[in-house]
Structures are given as C-alpha cells and as structure tokens.
Image (spheres, helix red, strand yellow):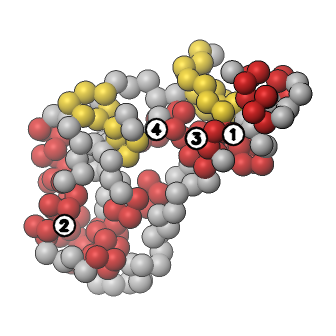
Amino acid sequence: MLARAAARSGVRRPSAIPIAVLPANLAKVAPLPARRRAAFRAHLLEQIGEAAKRERRRNPNSAGSDSAAPPPPIAAGCAACRGRCCNRGGEHAFVDFTTIRRYTAQTGVRAAPAIVQAYLRYLPLRSYRDSCVYHTAAGCNLPRTMRGDVCNQFYCGAILKQWQTLTREPTTIIAAADGSQVIRLRTTDQYR
C-alpha cells in the first residue's frame, strides 16, 4: 500500500508518507430491532413536543445548522474508522428539539406525523449493534440536514490531533486501529 500510495503521489520514499492512527469501530451490523425503532420513535415524539413548547430564543437557521460535509481527507479518516463515535447516538441519534426546530424552519413541515414519517423513513433495516439507530455499514443513513448538531460538528480527538496532517499532506496513510492492532488502512490521496 505504501509503495502504491507513493507512486500515485510522486513521493520517492514510501517511508516519508505520514501515518494517521485513528480508532476503529469494531461493532457488527445486525437487523435493527423493533424495540430500538420504537424507542427512537418515542424519543422523536418527545423532542417534537419540546420543540413546539419552546419559544424561539434564536433563529433556528443560524446556530448549529452547519451541515456541510467535512473536507475529503477528514471524511476519509471517519470512513476508515467507520464511526466509532456514533455509538453514543443510541436510540436518540442526537436528534433534539433544536434539530426539529431547524428541520421545520428549513422544510416548512410542522405537523408532528409528517416529521415522524420523515425521520422514520430513513431508519435502516440493518445498523451497527449498540450504536446510533441510523449508523450503517455505509455511514449515517440520515441526511446531514436532518442530523443533530453533534453529528455534523463533532470530530474525535484523534481526528483533531491529525487534522493538519490529513488536510495538508498530499498523501497520508490512515490506520484505523484497536490498540496496537491495525484493522483497516486507507490513503487520503484517493479522496482528494
């Protein structure tokens, strides 16, 4: 892999290519159980109710609405990891009343049944065990514009530590690891 990455990038010494070590998600994908679907639906209904009760303290389109994708090399790092941080999403998926307020402001959809239907249609048949209900082998099944602020703005400490290397170097090897065991390898030059 080093030799191929070096050849593609014009690097003469493969050993000169930086290596970014990131965590690796080790969870297994399984059918999303009905009980988890029901738990998310109950949470969603609660947040829709909370959004309806809260007075507008700020413009829901401004704060926390950045749903832009990360730079491609950073996205490559997250893809190599496969979303270990997503395991904290559980049955709430970080969808809260501010997410609902932003969604209604962007779409004009205000009826609770329509909001529920919009979110439930993205629940996958299979997701990672003990992770966010939307966390699939292909990434998040929920469109960025419907995700909670945490999902669109959070980067783990390992990514933040490696950010400059990942975004400035023409090629970086990404090693998604569990302790000292490398689970997956990627290169950032494939994503530029």
Q: Residue at x 75, y 33 (%)?
A: 8
Observer-side mark, 1 or 4, equals: 1
Give me the disc on residue 151.
none
The amino acid at mark 2 is Ile
First in sequence: mark 3 vs mark 1: 3
Residue hosting label 1? 189
For the residues labelled 4 and 3, the Cα–Cα distance comes to 11 Å
Residue hosting label 2? 115
First in sequence: mark 3 vs mark 2: 3
Tell me if residue 21 comes above or below residue 104 in the rendering.
Answer: above
In this rendered view, identify the residue nearer to me: 55 or 138: 138
The amino acid at mark 3 is Ala
The amino acid at mark 4 is Gly
Q: Residues within 10 Å of mark 1 (few under 14, many from 20)?
A: some
Q: Residue at x 44, y 24 (%)?
A: 26
First in sequence: mark 4 vs mark 3: 3
The reply to whether residue 131 is in sight is no
Residue hosting label 3? 76
